[in-house]
Structure formats: C-alpha cells, structure tokens
Amino acid sequence: MPEVPSYRIFASSQSASKALAEDISQLIRSRDSEERTTVLGLATGNTPVQLYKELIRMHRDGLSFRNVVTFNLDEYIGIDREHPESYWQFMHSHLFNHIDINPENIHIPEGMVAADNIESHCSAYENQIEEAGGIDLQVLGIGRNGHIGFNEPGVSPDVATHATELNQVTINDAAEAFGGAADVPQRAITMGVKTILGAQRIALLAFGSSKADIVERALTSGITSEVPATYLQSHNDTTFFLDQDAGKRLS
Ligand code: F6R
C-alpha cells in the first residue's frame, strides 16, 4: 500500500518556510561534514519566495552553498533568460544572486532550446541529475489543478524530464504576470513525475485557502493522473508544509 505523505500545519506561511529552511540547512551542514555535496531540486512561483528569503538570511549568518548543486523543476519554452518572467531570472533574483553557490552548480532547463534539440536537452538534464548523485531534497509547490512542476493533469508517472503543453488553469494563473493569457508561453520543459519521485526526500509547500481543496485531494484521494500530486502518495519520504489556510480541509 502506498504511504500517504505526512503533512505539517504551521501557524503561518513564514513559520512553514522557516522550518523547511532549517531542514535544508541541516542537510547541507551534515553533508558538508562528510565532504559530500548536497543536491537540491528547486521550485519557482510565489510559494517558495519566503523559503529563499530565509535561506539568504541563513547564508548571511554563515551557511555556505559552495557544496550545493541545484536542479530547477521547470522553465517556459520560448522565452530567454533575460525575460522578467523566466524561471532563470526568478531564481537568480530570489536566491542565487544572494548566496555563494558556484554558477556551474546551477541547473535550469533552457527555455530557448531549438525544437529539434528539446529531447536531447531533456535527456542531458536527466543525466546531469544522475551524475550529481540524484536529488537529496526536492522542493515543490502545487498548482490549483494539482500539477507538480509542470506535470499537468493526465500526465504519466513514468515520464522523466520532457516538454509539455501547459494546462488552461496554469495559463490563467500565470496571465497576470505576463500581462494577459495570450502572452503566457503555451509550453514548458519540466522534470517528470518519475524524476521527482526519484528524489530521496520531497517537501511540498502550499499556502493560502486557494490551495486548500487541491491539498486535500492530493493527500486523500486515490492516486490518479487527474491530480498529479497524488503520485506523491507512492513516495516514502514526502512531507507537505502547509499554513493553516492550505491545511484547513484536513482533520
Ligand atoms: C514552479 C512549479 C509549479 C508551481 C505551482 C504553484 O517551478 O513547478 O508547479 O510550484 O504552479 O505556483 P505558486 O507557488 O505560484 O502558487
């Protein structure tokens, strides 16, 4: 039987973010003490912003990211790094520009890869994760439609990093940032569910009442491709970090 992911409900999104940042810093320090690198899978979006702020604060207090390797979940296809809504831009402005990570250790799928090269780019991304020793801890958010990364409803759990069409809910949710749904990229490169489930440990953050229904479904409905986050029920070390609003439907 799959084990249902555990969940923790915090007084606020800030305390949830602090708790995960604390876990990440302990992981980095413990692997540093064994002279091993730490491989983090990272997410973008509104949800992890406070987590990254907290990690920057910890860096100012002495936490080093010199031995950290990162892999981001996803990137839009067709926008370049300098685009204000690119995930490359997001990660650099919200985290990487403020910590001592080696730029060579940062991996984000390339949004401007030529159509003919997408497949090889995706398999190279998988190889890089494998060569890094696999992901020690993957940070996730969750879309209102249950997506994780850009694994949209209907996705197979057996697919690794791939190019995908964005779901209409995802496009609508991104519309404001892009100045209208028509300007939201239609496609993205994303780690697959298979890639995500390959992580040793997974921490999913969800905040606010708009996530309450989908969090409940992700944790309590059976595993279904219609809610990709339910695939996390087949992973043996996943924790949802929730604030009170996102956790309000859970008893
Ligand atoms: C981001 C990602 C997405 C987001 C999700 C929630 O890299 O892969 O799955 O985590 O869309 O987005 P926010 O946090 O903006 O609600």
Image (tube, helix red, strand yellow):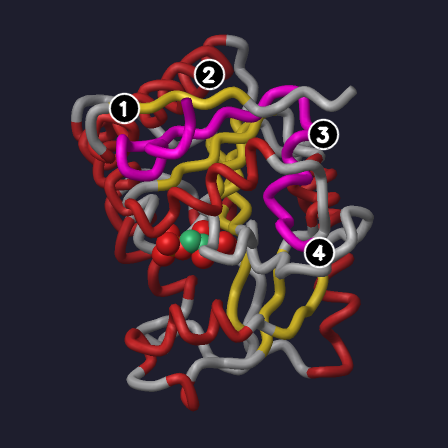
Q: Residue at x 43, y 90 (%)?
A: 182
Between the C-alphas of marks 2 and 1, the distance is: 29 Å
Q: CA distance from mark 4 to mark 3?
A: 19 Å
The residue labelled by disc 3 is: 234
Residue occupying image coordinates x 48% and y 69%:
169
Q: Could you say whether the residue bearing mark 2 is in a helix, strand or loop?
A: helix
Residue 110 placement, left or right of 83: right
Q: Which of pointers 2 and 1 lies earlier in the amino acid sequence?
A: 1
Which residue: 32% across, 20% down? 22
Q: Are marks 2 and 1 in contact (CB under 8 Å)?
A: no
Mark 2 belongs to which amino acid? Asp
Q: Is residue 145 magenta?
A: no
Is the residue marked by circle 1 packed among few (<14), some (14-19), or many (20+) residues within 10 Å?
some
Disc 3 residue type (three-letter): Ser
- Amino acid type at circle 4 is Thr
The quadrant the C terminus occupies is: top left
Q: Secondary structure at mark 3?
A: helix
In which quarter of the view is residue 99 placed? Answer: top left
Please give the range of residues in magenta.
Answer: 226-251
Where is mark 4, residue-wise? 161
Question: Comparing marks 2 and 3, which lies closer to the viewer?
Answer: 3
Q: Secondary structure at mark 4?
A: loop
Q: Considering only order in the chain, which callout, 3 or 2, is on the residue closer to the N terminus? A: 2
> In terms of depth relative to the viewer, which is nearer, 81 or 235?
235
Q: CA distance from mark 4 to mark 1?
A: 32 Å
Q: Are marks 4 and 2 in contact (CB under 8 Å)?
A: no
Between disc 4 and disc 1, the foreground one is: 1
Which residue position holds label 2? 32
Residue underneath mark 1: 10
